[in-house]
Image (cartoon, rainbow, N blue to C red):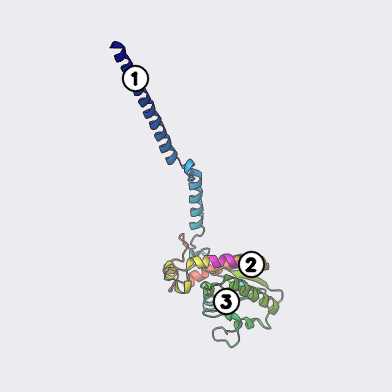
Amino acid sequence: MSSVKSGKSTAIGFVAAVLVIVILICVFHSGKQTRTETNPAQTGNSVSETLSETVVTTETTTKYSLVDPSSINTDFSCFDNCAFIGNSRLLALGNYGIAKNVFAKVALNVKTVFTDPGEGRSVPVINELDGKQFDKIFIMFGDNECGWGSMETFRNQYKKVISTCRTKVPGAEIILLSCLPISKTTSDKNVYEYNINNINNVNVIIEEIANEEGCKFIETGVGITGSDGYLPEEYSADGTHLKKDYCLVWARTVADNM
């Protein structure tokens, strides 16, 4: 009988030992799994990747810094022998007396520049260059084309504008100006798909066109773009067209980079 009891005790001890080992193994794997799931290096979200993403975001949001209008040089005589061709946002340069040769119109785009006369004029805007000599021709389009279904059409038409300018004024340097930012309120309204994302995308295309056509490209939003990427609400009465002080900041950016 004692040998039977001894055998039972041995069996019970063996089973208990096995259970302890199984429990220990489960605890070990559970702890390991927990550490693995909370370890950024094992999930693809490494600390370095997270920091990298933060840096990129920071660089994007702090790419611009607002400029105090009272601190800029307002001598724009450098524009005296230059021509400006484009949409209504360019009109401010003429209206505020910043530049003399501004050939522009409300809602003008890279197609209608060949057919529509400028404000108070009788010939198509592009024909304003006929018979004139300029050192530089600044071109600004893209705002009114944001909602176009085909950016390839925009690209081709823009190149046509450049080619025509070169034909009409041989020797003039062609400079492409980026679209300016708009206010968040205007962007959120998204009228005709006119929003900040589309403006940014159009600017990428304009810079590509400049590289392809051998033109200078000027990013003109420097100084009037907030850290959020928008035009500050108080810089414009309608979220698009600049008030005089901020038009001067914009013009200074152009003048300093021409």
In this view, 107 is above or below 35: below
Which label lies toward us, 2 or 1? Answer: 1
Q: So how many labels did they put on this image? A: 3
Disc 3 element: strand
Q: CA distance from mark 3 to mark 1?
A: 94 Å
Task: Name the residue carrying label 1.
Answer: 11
Residue type (three-letter) at the residue carrying disc 2: Ala
- Give the class, few, some or many, for how many residues have Cα within 10 Å of label 1's Cα (few <14, many ≥20): few
Task: Name the residue carrying label 2.
Answer: 210
Q: Which mark is residue 205?
A: none
Residue 13: x percent and y percent?
A: 34, 19
Residue type (three-letter) at the residue carrying disc 3: Gly
* Residue 218, picture quadrant: bottom right
In this view, 3 is above or below 82: above
Q: Report whether residue 29 is seen.
A: yes
Q: Report whether residue 241 is seen.
A: no
The residue drawn where x is 29% and y is 11% is 2
Q: CA distance from mark 2 to mark 1?
A: 86 Å
Disc 2 element: helix
Residue 59: x percent and y percent?
A: 51, 54
Answer left or right for 129 relative to 250. Answer: right
Task: Name the residue carrying label 3.
Answer: 86
- Magenta stretch, residue numbers: 201-206
Residue farthest along the right direction in this orientation: 171
Which quadrant: the N terminus? top left
